Image (spheres, helix red, strand yellow):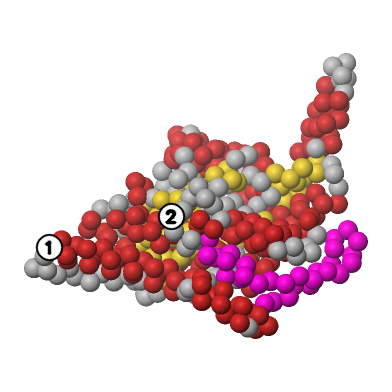
Amino acid sequence: MDPATSRPALVIDNGTGYTKLGFAGNVEPSFILPTVVAVNESFVNQTRATSKSSNWLAQHSAGVMADLDFFIAEEALARSKSSNTYNLSYPIKHGQVDNWDAMERFWQQCIFNYLRCDPEDHYFLLTESPITAPESREYTGEIMFETFNIPGLYIAVQPVLALAAGYTTSKCEMTGVVVDVGDGATHVVPVADGYVIGSSIKSIPIAGRDVTLFIQQLMKERGEHVPPEDSFEVARKVKEMYCYTCSDIVKEFNKHDKEPGKYIKHWRGTKPKTGAPYSCDIGYERFLGPEVFFNPEIYNTDFTTPLPEVIEKCIQSAPIDTRRALYKNIVLSGGSTMFKDFHRRLQRDIKKIVAARVLASDARLGGNVKAQPIEVNVVSHPIQRYAVWFGGSVLASTPEFFAACHTKAEYEEYGASICRTNPVFKGMY
């Protein structure tokens, strides 16, 4: 028996904005880190500056130093602010790995500096976006087996894990639509019996970072005195602390205008460079931020389809025999679904679309046949912020997990192509 199977697996959920990592069996991730790497470019630049006459050893040692001198997460952000020699690199863009060198460095720090464990002693569960290319899985497998020499690897699709986390009964419901709104990407993914219906996946170009940028833009246009270098961070904190979803945007404007004292919040901070205090008001952006999902035209003129309509189109493009089950189990996942009343607004808007369609269908049939009412249910639960990671933690705690993993021996025998497919296993039934 492989001794690594007696130890908890490592679960790493890599997102565009944040990476969640921890050990299988836990309810919450041990660390939530910004997915960013800062590399000291001065060594590399020195090497480039030296002429061809410089010896190979000097160039080689400079390359090695650059390999060693890097930071990730908050440390990377702090270094880039305090020193001009560090360049920030965001390895994941819109849910896809964009820079594999930076990604490898990021994983290295995650394993050794944060989780402080030997990768050779643990199986790994990594997550990926539902529209990841098979080649990307091969690269992941190569890095994990070659660089970190891990005993076993399973690459899970994020929405399937979110569905596994969203169950409310003892029997896990593995059919449903996952609305995954992260920092850099929003996906609407239908899943039937644990399998992603790939042809019906919808993605929209509005996610958490866009809400932050919109709030930043609103505050800037109103002339709030926020230091430019701090404005994005302030907008992000305003989004996380004060934003909520309203039921009617016009009524909300009227409420704010009638009782500004009740609804306007105040933000106080200190300027990073001088240390001088500053303050600003937070007004309409409290409800206008999350509104970009329901009325995207207020932020993006190129994309104007509201999120409830995208979900409706996604379900309608799925096989007809799965649609009722999909409407019944719409699961939210990701930090940008945590706005107060977000799930209520989503459920109300989807119900309206469905009711209008059923009414039109009844009218077409001349009232002779009445359509059965369709149950629409948007599931919200306390752990939806880490739903993907928690689903991974649940799956990686089951005995079936180790049997489903690709092992180091299989990798050595068949190569990286084994990582292209990862079997769906129902560890929760």
| Numbered tag placed on residue 305 in the rendering | 2
Q: Is residue 13 visible?
A: no
Q: Position of residue 27 (x, y in %)?
A: 54, 70
On the picture, is 77 further left or further right than 317? Answer: right
Which quadrant: the C terminus? bottom left
Amino acid type of the residue tagged 1 in the rendering = Leu
Answer whether residue 267 is magenta in the image: yes
Q: Secondary structure at mark 1?
A: loop
Front residue (pair 330, 237): 237
Front residue (pair 181, 101): 181
Q: Secondary structure at mark 2?
A: loop
As displayed, is residue 128 above or below residue 290?
A: above
Q: Residue at x 84, y 42 (%)?
A: 85
- Residue 148: image quadrant is top right
State the extent of the magenta-drawn residues as a range. 264-292
Front residue (pair 406, 368): 368
Q: Name the residue furthest left.
A: 368
| Numbered tag placed on residue 365 in the rendering | 1
On the picture, is 146 further left or further right than 249? Answer: right
